[in-house]
Amino acid sequence: MSKIRVYQLAKDLNLTSKELIEKFEALGVEVHNHMSTLEDSDIEVLKALLSGAVSESIEAEEDEEEIEEVEEDLFEDEAEALYEDDLEDEIIKSSFADKKIEKPKKVIRAIEEAEEEIEQQLEGRGSKNKKAKKKRRQETNPAFRPQEFSYENEIVLGETISIGELAKELKKQPKDIIMKLMNLGVMATLNQDIDFETAEMIAIEYGISVSKKLTEEEIEEKRYNFEDRPEDLTKRAPVVTVMGHVDHGKTSLLDAIRNTSVTTGEAGGITQHIGASEVSLKGEKIVFLDTPGHEAFTTLRARGAKVTDIAILVVAADDGVMPQTIEAIDHAKAAGVPIIVAVNKIDKANANPDRVKQELADRGLLIEEWGGDVISVEVSAIKNIGIDTLLEMVLLVAEMLELKANPKRPALGTILEAKVEKGRGPVATVLIENGTLRVGDPVAAGATHGRVRAMFNSHGKTIKQAGPASAVEITGLNDVPTAGDKFYATEEERHARAMAEKRQAELRVSTLRKTPHISLEDLFNQISQGQIKDLNIIVKADAHGSVEALKTSLNKITNEEVRVNVIHANVGTITESDILLASASNAIIIGFNVRPSAVVASLAENEGVELKTYRIIYEAISDVEAAMKGMLAPIYKEVVLGTLSIRATFKVPNVGTIAGAYVTNGKVTRNSQVRLIRDGIVIHEGKLSSLKRFKDDAKEVAQGYECGVGLENYNDLKEGDEIEAFIIEEVKRS
Ligand SMILES: Nc1nc2c(ncn2[C@@H]2O[C@H](COP(=O)(O)OP(=O)(O)OP(=O)(O)O)[C@@H](O)[C@H]2O)c(=O)[nH]1
């Protein structure tokens, strides 16, 4: 075997000896100095590296198809270690495979050493600490780049602070702060605690910005829930839901779509039900949520998860627009999700696609042929007609939506399904909406947490990583999360645990105190605080005429601050789907001559949805109008202001009887209402017509003073009578 020395090779490669030695060292090949001799195999490795083959193979590793299978029971660190094994294997394989040479001995030794080191760590015998481990992961996993959290302002104050401390923080004299507080109507001493909001007001008075100290959990959430920088964003696949009336072919269409993808050979294997499927058309991916129907879609939305980008509305060409077609349209519209119409069953003899289009137009869904912008495709799920065109249209709409995500951040998404499986523990389907999820990542899902032990794609294939817009099944959570729960991958396990614990605490509170949605009673409040600009209403009535009458009249109600939107109106009783839509869209439900079942009523209560039923259309409309003005039939209570005793009476021409009275307790005001009491019996109730002190009109006369009073339309006043003055006050509705 011919021997070549380091300096000779360096010259050939146009490198300095030092540079070459460094490169060999990086490969794990020991080279003492420029005179050292080199093995042929080492030289081959180096040449491969320099020609770019190795770095290419690192990228190839990113391709999930190329990654070898992982044992399911891998534990966190094992998974991590294995990940690295594969990386090294890949480097070696692709460097040598085509060249048909064996792995160089020294490289093998270096790998073995690395393996030993990892094993030692696993057994707890290694000396490497956690920091080293974290560093290693950061090097191998570019997704671990959570945003570093920092406060916006230099001065950070807690929930409460004493005046003395605040003075120190703001570098002001305590007495000045006490003065400023007095101006704000707050009397406080040096050691007294004030809340953050008050402290902030004082700081603002001095022109100083302060931040509120966040809890550790709040900081964690901020670190993982940050906005992406535009330059980090890349195109992502659309997520699609199929909706439509019962038996119009939603399930058949989903099956047809999945089969198309399999037969084109782009994906293989048996489709496993994980709650979502991924299909590809011309190399472009589309994610379909497996549970068809607008209820599933709105259930997720009611839990705060907006996962669908596009809705496919299936309408059977032999049946036309039906009640659930209308519901589906309204649910998609309420969510602001674009609709693509799939006119299905066109293979049927009695298919009438034109009628479908006409009926859709009548419902305000204008397809392109009708001058609108909604795409419609004629398909047959059974005969496999038009499926590719439908998918192309999905990609087209997706392109217009410019869907983007950042694959470099830690994954975040939504739980679509979750269950416990024997031998596997909690198994959850996650829709990764952003970022990249890897085996071994610590994760939080709602109130649960853990580490991704194993991950599968929708074809049931083991994968090690998944990017944005992927539906994957994972194991490794400590418990079963709920569909709709938010999902986060974190840098460290303690971050995930903190997030889950925060969610647990929130759940404990929310089971005690449900956060209600909008109600008529609370409407004016929310309008006044600028919290609401649209009042969403769902109308359900016994007859088509009533639906239309209510819808038209309600849609007309608008004032400067708020506009009424009837987001869904249909004939029939109030259903669970209506409650979910109301919950997801912060709407109230108005029922006319319909009553909800007990189940629906209790769902409404659980979801905090207001459900009002009427038997007179006018009442429904005037209630909404009144609520918007904050004048919803208020509850009043009487407040007694004071009592007067009549000492003398005078007859004044053209005015009537005037009494000279003495305020025995409390007071009387000009706008008081009065009750005339003689011998303990109320003989008259009415308003004051005049209240005077001497000759002058008085606004109010207090206890211990005399005054002249006249009663409106009442003259039977006698010496010794008592007058009770009161006002009617509105009781704040809870
Ligand atoms: N001729 C014909 N029949 C179809 C087509 N698509 C679906 N069907 C039939 O219509 C019926 C209902 O189809 P499904 O796919 O179950 O409809 P669905 O909307 O999922 O029904 P639900 O899940 O009950 O809401 C089945 O008998 C299908 O075989 C089609 O394109 N042509």
Image (cartoon, rainbow, N blue to C red):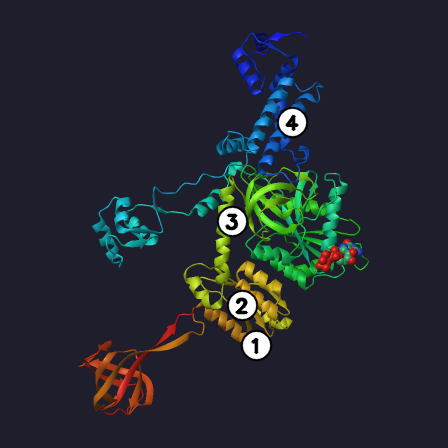
Kindly identify the amino acid type of the residue bearing the numbered disc 1: Arg
- Identity of the residue furthest to the right in this view: 349
2 or 4: tag closer to the N-terminus = 4
Q: Is the shortest distance between ligand 1 and the CB of mark 2 under 8 Å?
A: no
610 or 458: which is nearer to us?
A: 458
Q: Could you say where residue 361 lies in the image, as x and y percent from the top left?
A: 66, 59
**Number of residues whose C-alpha sits closer than 10 Å to that of mark 4, classed few (under 14), some (14–19) or many (20 or more):** some
Kindly identify the amino acid type of the residue bearing the numbered disc 4: Asp
Could you tell me which quadrant the C terminus lies in? bottom left
Q: Nearer the viewer, mark 2 or mark 4?
A: 4
Q: Within the image, what quadrant is residue 297 found in? A: bottom right
1 or 4: tag closer to the N-terminus = 4
**Alpha carbons under labels 3 and 1: distance apart:** 47 Å
Marker disc for residue 554: 2
Q: Could you say where residue 578 lies in the image, as x and y percent from the top left?
A: 60, 64
Provide the residue designation for mark 4.
89
Marker disc for residue 122: none
Is disc 3 placed on a helix, strand or loop? helix
3 or 1: tag closer to the N-terminus = 3
- Identity of the residue furthest to the left in this view: 694
476 or 414: which is nearer to us?
A: 476
Is disc 1 placed on a helix, strand or loop? loop
Q: Within the image, what quadrant is residue 349 found in? A: bottom right
Give the side of residue 509 with respect to residue 438, left or right: left
The residue at the point 74 percent across, 50 percent down is 255
